[in-house]
Every structure is written in C-alpha cells, then in structure tokens.
Image (spheres, helix red, strand yellow):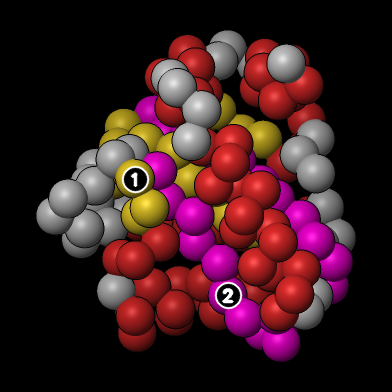
Amino acid sequence: MLSRETIALRVPATTWEDAVRVAGQLLVAAGAAEPRYIEGMIRTVRELGPYSVIMPGVAIPHARPEEGALREGFSLITLAEPVLFGNPDNDPVHVVIAFCAPDAGAHLETLRHLAEFLGQPEVVARLLAAETPDDVLAMLKA
C-alpha cells in the first residue's frame, strides 16, 4: 500500500501536528483520503491523547473512516528531528505512519498488518536508516 509517492524521508517538522499534516497530505495526494481527513487525525490525537504513539519512536495517526477516508492507504514519513506527541513512555517520535480505511473492518485489518510489520526486530532503525523511498519499499518486500 506504500509507494514512492506516499513515503517521505527526513521531513522537517517542529510539532506533532506538522508531522501529522505532512503524512496526511501524502494520503490526500495519493487519492486515499479527502483533505478533511488530515484535520480528523489531528482532532483524534487532541481528543483521545497520544495513544497513536504505539511503540518507542513510532506514531500511527488515523481518523475514523467517515472523516474522509476514500480507500485503504498508508503514508510513511521519517522526521529530520523527532517530535513530542505527549506520550511519556514512547516519545519522541521519529517515524509517522498515517493510514486510512473506508470502513471499520478494513480499519482493524489495517492496524493488524501494521502491528505485524512494526513487530519485526529493528524495523524502526532500518526505516530511519533508509536513504530513499525505494529503500523502504525494498524493506517491505523482504
């Protein structure tokens, strides 16, 4: 579900909101979400807290399907400098993987696949070491 167009590396961001906006814009540009989905992701973090920071250094912001998800999609960014989401156990965040899914079933299945991927040893370090989107895609295929 990732492509060269939905991966951005060493993105400058000064706040978690900036990071979520960049990751969300990649979903919008790919046709996976409407622009309002970006604000839905930000609103979700503001309302529910930094639960989307699921492990040290990694956040997976998302919004409810009805907030503008058009199809299943992922974007992945690494940050030039980490940002704080407010999660005392898993901040700072270096990798943001935004996703959207058009229905609740696909939403849960997407989370399951993402958890499997991130559960692999050293995946975060390898993402941070990636030089190009093709490096990330090759890692996903391996």
Specify the label residue 55 is tagged with: 1
User: Disc 2 on helix, strand or loop?
Assistant: loop
Q: Position of residue 91 (x, y in %)?
A: 22, 46
Q: Is residue 100 above or below residue 4?
A: below
Q: Amino acid at mark 2?
A: Ala
Q: Position of residue 10 (x, y in %)?
A: 47, 27
Q: Amino acid at mark 1?
A: Met
Report the magenta residues as a range.
58-80
Residue toward you, 10 or 65: 65
Viewer-nearest of discs 1 and 2: 1
Q: Which residue is at a point 38% across and 53% down the rendered structure image?
A: 54
In the picture, the quarter occupied by the C terminus is: top right
In the picture, the quarter occupied by the N terminus is: top right
Mark 1 vs mark 2, CA separation in Å: 19 Å
Sequence-wise first label, 1 or 2: 1
12 relative to 25 in the view: left or right: left
